[in-house]
Amino acid sequence: MILQIYKALVTFSGLFLDVYFRLRLVRGKENKFRLNERRGIATKSRPSGRLVWLHAVSVGEAAGLLALIKIIHDTKPWIILLLTTCTVTSGDLIRKLLPKGVIHQFIPIDRPAWVGRFLDYWNPDLAIWMESDLWPTMVTEANARGIYMIIVSGRLSFRAFQRWKSIGSLAKPLFSAFDLVLAASHEQVRRFFALGCVDVRYVGNLKDSIVPPKVDIKIAAALRNSITYRPVWLAASTHRGEESLVLDAHAQIAKTKPNLLTVIVPRHTNRSDEIARIVQRRGLTLVRRSANQSIKERTSVYLADTMGEIAIFYSVIPVTFLAGSMVKVGGHNPIEASYCGTAIVFGPLMENNRESADALIAAGAAREVNDAASLAKTVEDLLDDPITANEMGACARRVAIARAIKINSILEVIDPILPEKPLGVT
């Protein structure tokens, strides 16, 4: 009954969606040239052949799927690969990284008519969902068409798990629609079983198997030259509320290191003006990468508000605070930073990537802090002890490489399910 009510509500919501889309366009959250994709209208042609559809909500999840996409693309070229994401940021970034021939589209709004249009056009043989961005109409309609569906790196926060449990009449048809769930941890296995999934296994977390980031050597060298002889640390993927905490830590460290440089890479670049105002209210000298401003001797904060360059900063700066871990975001995947060999510091709210975080702590590659004061103390200690910081970075790289091996276990499970080579195809 709840599923029927949900579908009726999203059907009638069409009366308001034009206003919703206009507001999102103004806020930079939609691409006006690809808005029809939100209505299930394709903007790319569908080649003939067997198609595997993969879905990820945003940048981090899409990056996790990239390793899987590349392997399928290279080893099974007869398979057409379609990747959908939700956010404009993820679409803009991931399209640059996809192998040639892999199609990207934005997932449609979860209205039955638009979902049906999407499924009719693309007609996937297999659907692979990353983590838990599950849309009830899309899932149940795909299931009704007999599309084999898998969740990889399945993950539900405790709050999300409790919410789904409280509406079991909606959760059961949704979660039981999946033929296979590859959970992100043993605890996640228990959660997916409890919500009605039938075949749930733990074989490793696909987000640990991200493709090692490529770093532009020239840009990295220019950045390294601009910060030589200065104590510098990085606050990566910050969210609202974390910049103030980072600046509190900056003020504390600067008492003993007046030439300190703090580099801030926001998770969402559309917050750049907001962050700049926060910095300037502190009386700190700020330069912005998006404005092509150079770091000067008196620069206190470098706002790296561009997309797709974070690996450059990870590779050059010796100490990184991985944000999203001091606010209720759940923490970001630390594996990309680990590949780049930076010493990692994060807050206590790492639920989304707890297993990777614990592995890094156990290896001596990361340290956990609780507030601005402990963040300042930890960063200052590492800046005072570059040998330890370098050792932590080397340990982090070893952890990343070791955990990446797990993709082989995931592939062993998925491989028999992938569409077979058609007769006559060489």
Image: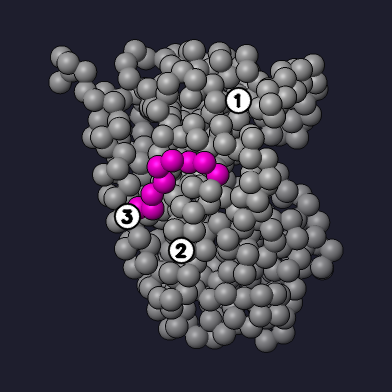
Amino acid type, label 1: Thr
Q: Farthest right residue?
A: 281
Q: Is residue 389 above or below residue 148?
A: below
Which callout, 2 or 1, points to the residue nearer the camera?
Answer: 1
Residue drawn where x is 74% and y is 56% of the image: 240
Residue ID for mark 2? 356
Residue ID for mark 3? 406
Give how far apart the Cα atoms at labels 2 and 1 are: 32 Å
| In the foreground, 128 or 311 | 128
Residue drawn where x is 57% and y is 75% of the image: 368
| In the foreground, 299 or 169 | 169
Give how far apart the Cα atoms at labels 2 and 3 are: 12 Å
Quadrant location of the C terminus in the rendered image: top left
Amino acid type, label 3: Lys
Describe the element under mark 3 as helix, strand or loop.
loop
Sort mark 2 into few (<14), some (14-19) or many (20+) by Cα contacts within 10 Å: many
Describe the element under mark 2 as helix, strand or loop.
helix
For the stretch drawn in magenta, the main secondary structure is loop
Where does residue 63 sit, x and y in percent of width and height? 46, 45
Verify whether residue 408 appears in magenta. no
> If you read the primary sequence from the N terminus, does the residue marked by circle 2 or circle 1 appear first?
1
Q: Which residues are magenta?
A: 195-203
Residue ID for mark 1? 137
Is disc 1 in contact with disc 3, using a CB cutoff of under 8 Å? no
Which callout, 1 or 3, points to the residue nearer the camera?
Answer: 1
> If you read the primary sequence from the N terminus, does the residue marked by circle 2 or circle 3 appear first?
2
Residue drawn where x is 56% and y is 15% of the image: 116
Describe the element under mark 1 as helix, strand or loop.
helix
Q: Is residue 412 above or below residue 346?
A: above
